[in-house]
Image (cartoon, rainbow, N blue to C red):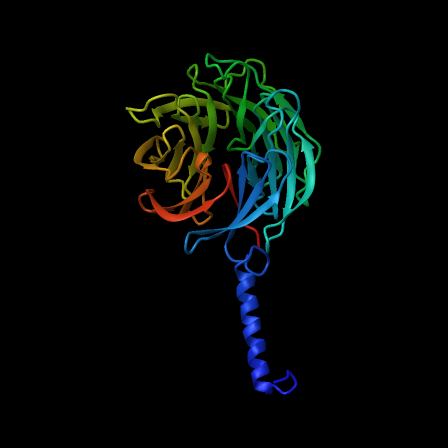
Amino acid sequence: MTWKAMPALLLAGVALAWSCQASADAAGRPGKAGAEKGELVYLGTHGAQLRAARFDARSGVLTDIGVVAEDGRPTWAVAHPHLPMIYVTDEAGNDGQSNGHVLAYRIDAATGALRLVSKVDAGGGGTTFLSLDPHGGTLVAANYGGGSVATFPVQADGALGPRASLVQDHGTGPHRRQKSPHAHAAIVAPGGRALLVADLGADRVFVYPFDPMRHEAQAPRPGSAGDYVAPPGSGPRHMVAARDGRFLYLLDELNADLVTLRWDAGAGHLSPVDEQPTRSSDALGESSGSELALSRDGRFLYAGNRSEGMLLAYALDKPSGKATLVQRIASGGKVPWSFALSPDGRWMLVANEQSDEIRVFAVDARSGRLTATDKQLQTPHPVSITFASVR
């Protein structure tokens, strides 16, 4: 039978079948047709690849999109709270031979693809951490290798303006990794008038005055005593502020301790409240704390111990700020470098760097406890997870 002789009804049926098959094929491939459902997630890696995935908050399924950028060493990223933008580190220069960079990308909400908008010199080597102020007006970059912190204005379109300030940390510690300052994280403090810098090399959380209108951090005033001085060899790594802004939670890398600090925004002063280990009593070898995250309602805090491959959940007492351990659970892989909570707070995605995978855990909203699921995504050497809620 020739095509011309084929009955019209049969032709219509074949066309419909082809259309359905094409739709099914498109839905199974990374790209616009099948990628519009779920949150976009960007995965920083130890390597040259920034990867993307889609996360379905109904099922907990994480679906790979693939490589979306290959520029430098993209170990950390932060998404803008209002614009379809993501800011990514190029962690070059930990050897002291060059500076790191910050790259600003515009996100295609339908596909997850990225378009480079601007690239700025971070003013120091080994740019390892980025944060934004709550309004998205200032981007802060911590340079691990250079022991410095840079600030940049975020323009109306999300591009980065010229560097507004660069502040150099000072200090050393007794550990072999503390021969010079190493700024490992930096955030705008609650109240918006100070910059807090966790420095692994100097055993301090520095408190620098910050002008939000000029996007500038400044060296501390003469006689200022607002810094938190950690025990020698602690190695401050990452920190997160309580929802009410009265407390700061700090995770030390070298001794893997969790520290609760009281923040006095008026005086620009940090003072210790509590300190407790994340390592188990029978742990052997060197300790290594990794990541912190606060639940959306501020009732629970999560910490990572990558030397033991463990995740820890804490209940927070609002009046005192103290953290009480409620759970220790294996990360499901090797070396949990980082993790992130989904925007709805129901899931935690964990980057197990040495087992090349992202593991998905369910979060119980009432108890704060984590439950391992069978959901995972294989990806090379993941070290950071960033949700980008763009539409």
Residue 18, image x, y percentages: 57, 72
Side of 121 relative to 288 (left or right) = right
- The residue nearer to you, when weighing 246 against 330, is 330
Up the image or down, 136 lies above or below 246; here it is below
6 or 101: nearer the viewer: 6
Question: Can residue 346 be seen by looking at this rendering?
Answer: no
Q: How many marks?
A: 0
Dividing the picture into quarters, in which one does residue 79 lie? top right
Quadrant where the C terminus is found in the figure: bottom right
Quarter holding residue 137? top right
Where's residue 141, x and y in %?
Answer: 59, 30
Q: Looking at this view, is 108 or 69 the one in front?
A: 69
Residue lying at 61% horizontally and 45% vertically, measured from the top left: 68
Against 238, residue 11 (above or below) is below
**Residue 237 in the image, given as x and y percentages of width and height:** 47, 26
Residue furthest to the top in view is 174
Is 247 located above or below residue 173 in the figure? below
Toward the viewer: 239 or 349?
Answer: 349
Q: Which residue occupies the extreme left position in the image? A: 282
- The picture places residue 135, in percent across and down from the top left corner, at 58, 41
Q: What is the quadrant of the N terminus in the image? A: bottom right
Please indicate, yes or no, whether residue 51 appears anywhere in the rendered image.
yes
Report the side of 101 relative to 41 (left or right).
Answer: right
Residue drawn at the location 41% of the way across and 41% of the way down: 295
Q: Quadrant of residue 288?
A: top left
